[in-house]
Amino acid sequence: MKKMIKLATAAMLMALPAGGQVAAQNTSVDWDIVTKIRDEGFNRSKVMETVQYLTDVIGPRLSGSPQMQQASEWTRDTLAAWGMDNARLEGFEFGPGWSSEHTVVKMTSPRTSQLYARAMSWHPGTDGVVNGDVVYAPMSSKADFEKYKGTLKGKIVMVDKVRPQREPSNQVFTRRSDEEIANRLDFSIPTGEAEDPMKWWSNYLGFFHEREQFLRSEGALVMVRNSPRNAMLLDANAYQHATGMNAEIPAVGMAAEHYNRLKRLIDLDKTVSLSVEVKAQFHTEDTKTYNTLADIDGETDEVVLVGAHLDSWHLGDGAVDNAAGSAVAMEAMRIIKTLGVKPKRTIRIGLWSGEEQGYFGSQAYVLDHLVSRPQSDNERYKYAGTYEKHYNMFPMEKKPSYNKFSAYYNLDNGSGKIRGIYAEQNSAAGHIFKSWLEPFHDLGAKHVTLNDTGGTDHEPFDDIGLPGFQFMQDSLDYSTRLHHTQVDTYDHVYEKDLKQAAVIMASFLWHTAQMDTLMPREPEPKKVTYQ
């Protein structure tokens, strides 16, 4: 769900001054507890064991799939075994699960060749081998449908454009220098009128449905998508998971190099034929998917929350996206529990499902525990998910736990070490974070920016006026080759980085739990009328 844009509501919030609430409470560092956290986290860590079980043993965790359910139950049971209080699962409506056993795609004419492709999520299997000629019919909007009416029956259809050839970048793995980060710390002042953040996303989702329905109505056999990456990296993500809205035509995502070859052969007036076999199934016995929750009970029922999304896409093993973040959150909880200290506030972990489809798990938590918001009946949101339709809807009614919520911390930008934190325009929180990062300057974590960041599960909290934060991380090879691809495996997770992140996360959780008052908040969101 990394392409979701930052909600305009949150972007418009004004930052609080650094005085007042900050000056009235003790936010100093407890150096003794930091020493104990570092000792436990560096010398007796279980973070890599957790990542390995989630990836090598369980594997990809598509929301609603049997593997996602296995991961939810395993994390619950593991947290309970580590001594957490009230380890539990909380379900929410999602739609049919889906899984795929195998995908075999071969070119049979004008020559034979094994092609590299995988089934698109939430598309049916082929019920055996399907043979057909290939048609290149790129469609990027509904206006393109008219061009191909009456030409697709019995065809295997390539629906994406071939991209122009470009020189590849050789910079695959990167760590951010302090100078590079410093150049990004200056606050970016919002400009222009607010735009409806759900309009773009709903249109994006809607076109998946409309194109698939058009192909089915025209009698196409199989849809073929072009991978957005080169170097044989695959991306086969589709979003038609809601009950009654599942795709009805088989679809595969194909490596760009093989997709391009098919197009070149068609341009030479060659008859290009494929054989396609996809074994896939929908899981309808339980249309809910589940969040994992567990607590370290505090002296009060005020809550500090740490989280990451446990779900992944189906191609790789979901290692850096986001077994890494889930393992860090679990490890931070384990470290604190192992110290045998009781926090002032309850410290809770939330491992979310449905993030890749639209923050569904974290949104479900927000709506179940913190606020009530009406659901939009706007036609433009027709294809948006159930929980997405609550975005920016008013009146926003607070539940009792809203005023007992301190802060939410998230990790979801790969397995790179923490370099700082996004304070989300909250000047008061940013002032506190500078102090809390001081014990970790020797680990490369020094930076606080008031800028927003998007694309992670902190947003549903931030968007209702509660402190929600995402840590700033080293990029490594997250964006260049791992994110949502088949090579997102344990091999690309770095032990030192995850240990560092878990130690910092544990320290932030402890210090937030021990503050004299709740974490300072931004002004509450106000209703925005979009054009």
Image (cartoon, grey):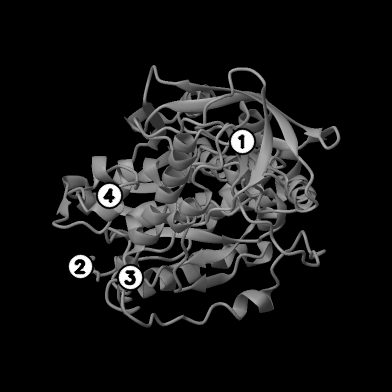
How far, Cα to Cα, is label 3 from label 4?
16 Å
Which structural element holds mark 2? loop
In the rendered structure, are the residues bearing label 4 and label 2 in contact, judged by CB atoms less than 8 Å apart? no
Q: What residue is drawn where x is 66% and y is 48%?
A: 227
Name the residue tied to disc 2: 526
Q: What residue is drawn where x is 56% and y is 55%?
A: 504
Q: Is residue 143 left or right of residue 491?
A: left
Instruction: Say if 472 sits above or below 221 in the image.
Output: below
Front residue of 333 and 251: 251
How far, Cα to Cα, is label 1 from label 4?
36 Å
Front residue of 253 and 17: 253
Name the residue tied to disc 3: 195
Name the residue tied to disc 4: 389
Residue 25 showing in the rendered view = no
Q: Position of residue 77 (x, y in %)?
A: 48, 23
Q: Is residue 18 left or right of residue 72?
A: left
Which of the 4 image quadrants contains residue 126?
top right
Of callouts 4 and 2, the N-terminal one: 4
Residue 186 showing in the rendered view = yes
Q: How many C-alpha atoms fall within 10 Å of the one at disc 4: few (<14), some, or many (≥20)? A: many
Q: How many C-alpha atoms fall within 10 Å of the one at disc 3: few (<14), some, or many (≥20)? A: some
Of callouts 3 and 4, the N-terminal one: 3
Which structural element holds mark 3? loop
Name the residue tied to disc 1: 155
Q: How many C-alpha atoms fall within 10 Å of the one at disc 2: few (<14), some, or many (≥20)? A: some
Of callouts 1 and 4, the N-terminal one: 1
Q: Position of residue 217 (x, y in %)?
A: 44, 36
